Image (spheres, helix red, strand yellow):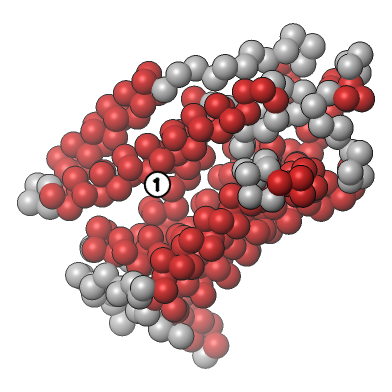
Amino acid sequence: MSTNTYKGLLLRGVGAGAVAGLLAGLVGVLVVEAPIRAALAVEQARPDAPDAGHGHGELFSRGTQVVGGVLAAVVVGLAVGALFATAYAGSRRWFTSKAPFVRAVALSAAAFGAAALLPAVKYPANPPAVGDPATVEYRTVLYLGLIAAGLLVAVGASHLASRLGHLGAPVRATAVASAVVAAVVVLLVAFPATPDAVPSDLPGGVLWEFRLASLAETATLWLGLGVVFGLLVDPATRRAKRVSAL
Amino acid sequence: MTSPAHPLPTPIPKWAYAVALVALTVTWLVLQENGIALGHAAETVHEFFHDGRHALGVPCH
């Protein structure tokens, strides 16, 4: 299927999303699972543990939840892959001078920045044992709002770049980067602080290990998606295949 | 052999919006659903995808 039709891009996006989701799920099992277990141990050691909001491991065993964690990454990878392909189809005019592989990785880096890195800086991921169930809706609105604002900044930056097409590349890149940094600083200051404090019984080391591991998983998902999708759409990949077949 | 200097954007058909809607709904169900769409069954979904939600940085309970 051609890389110039929406259907061809969509199939490649979904395929790349499945691969990236599986890789992210593996990072989840191998890297994120250890601090999750450490945090669950802290939560279960609390005196009110049995009826603390929602009983971990009561509906599903830990093993099933680990499988569910991988499945979550794969399903989200498939969905995000479809959205990524659509964004790529619509955004081709924005990086006209670059190879498809570079465009795909640049788009995934922008998506990772807006949808994962920006919310991780303002509202870092929390392991189990952190978070008041009563504030979950407010925290969700803040988190999704910041992602939406970050995506707007990314779209705005690409429009600005195309508007400044008459400038030399270094001047244009500096202008766009300055605008993005200014917009991100405004967002980080304007959005309210997270309402929940981290409980004192959770070791700081576990918290940091979890937050960095979580960021590694989302980076694997987004940047893996960009790299695999880029390999699937770039004509140079097919040329390399033909050459190696000779 | 070389990629064109000014590729045309790929036309996006109408049904692409349906695909995007399905993709967003699936993402919502896996990462955010806490009872709005599924009611009581949401707890089962939430618990099954629990580790994935935390690991992907989504606000949880």
Q: Residue furthest front?
A: B39
Of residues A161 and B51, the one nearer the viewer is: B51
Considering the image in quadrants, where does the N terminus of chain B appear? bottom left
Q: The residue under label 1 is which amino acid type?
A: Ala
A43 or A113: nearer the viewer: A43
- Whether residue A69 is visible, yes or no, is no
Q: Which residue is mark 1?
A: A110
Image-based side of A228 in relation to B45, left or right? left
**Residue B30 placed where, x, y %?**
66, 50
Q: Is residue A44 above or below residue A199?
A: below
Identify the residue shown where x is 45% and y is 19%: A192
Outermost residue, bottom side? A246
Q: Position of residue A152 (x, y in %)?
A: 33, 42
In which quadrant of the rendered image does the C terminus of chain B lie? top right
Q: Position of residue B4 (x, y in %)?
A: 24, 75
In the image: residue A96, left or right of residue A232: left
Q: Label 1 lies in what chain?
A: A
Nearest to the observer: residue A163 or residue A68: A68
The answer to whether A142 is drawn above or below residue A237 in the figure is above
Q: Secondary structure at mark 1?
A: helix
Quarter of image, res A93: bottom left
Task: Check the image and report above or below for A1 versus A125.
Answer: below
- The crowding category of the residue bearing disc 1, from other C-alpha atoms within 10 Å (few below 14, some 14 to 19, many at least 20), is many
